[in-house]
Image (cartoon, coloured by chain):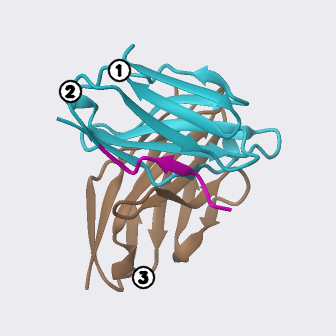
Amino acid sequence: AQSVAQPEDQVNVAEGNPLTVKCTYSVSGNPYLFWYVQYPNRGLQFLLKYITGDNLVKGSYGFEAEFNKSQTSFHLKKPSALVSDSALYFCAVGGGATNKLIFGTGTLLAVQP
Amino acid sequence: DAGVIQSPRHEVTEMGQEVTLRCKPISGHDYLFWYRQTMMRGLELLIYFNNNVPIDDSGMPEDRFSAKMPNASFSTLKIQPSEPRDSAVYFCASRFVEGASSGANVLTFGAGSRLTVL
């Protein structure tokens, strides 16, 4: 069965500092990994995905994520955080024998000015 | 493209009443997903359809929940009777399958329906 874990409920970072939001996954076979962002009272928006190829994936708004197969991780990163990055971030895993996309519990990113 | 459209955006009802949530996926998308979001449980997959056919409903909490997709442009999620613990935000999402691996394609989410059961 697919599963994804986001170990931090909340990440606090000062504006201008680098940020990391952690994600680990479990899936049989090759994983399809996604990051989505949710702003208050909105639906989820796609940020980036890893399917195959280069382990470093670049996405929207300056975000990137690194796929690490040995650690089964797919951490989201950004070199310099903005206050406007404050939102709820979800990691998700697909693939395996199903077409499901399973989400983690989400990590609230709070960027202080 | 108007995106995935959900209605109502907000619903307040009393325990025991029937609730129907509606979703119009993006035209041409052949997968449709229903998710439920709560503080306690995060984002849970309830059911998904492929070409209007329910594929996996193992996430549906209990028999009070049912979902249908009578055609490619419309789906409903019904709760009958509703209970306070059903209070949540319900999201619909759709996906267009491109390539051999449908799981690699991006989901587009609607804005959600916030349900409050008193």
- Give the amino acid at mark 2: Met
The chain to which mark 3 is attached is: A
Tell me, yes or no, whether the highlighted magenta stretch contains residue B6. yes
Disc with the residue nearer the chain's start (1 vs 2): 2
Compute the Cα span from label 2 to label 3: 47 Å
Q: Position of residue B51 (x, y in %)?
A: 73, 30
Kindly identify which residue carries mark 3.
A80
Residue B15 is marked as 2
Residue B80 is marked as 1
Name the residue furthest right: B99
The vertical placement of A58 against B118, above or below, is: below
Q: Position of residue A51 (x, y in %)?
A: 69, 50
**For the C terminus of chain A, which image quadrant?**
bottom left
Q: Residues within 10 Å of mark 3 (few under 14, many from 20)?
A: some
Residue at 47% over, 30% down: B77
- Give the amino acid at mark 1: Gln
Tell me, yes or no, whether the highlighted magenta stretch contains residue A60. no
- Helix, strand or loop under label 1: loop
Q: Position of residue B66 (x, y in %)?
A: 47, 21
Compute the Cα span from label 1 to label 2: 10 Å
Splitting the image into 4 quarters, where does residue B18 fall?
top left
Q: Camera-side residue: A48 or B21? A: B21
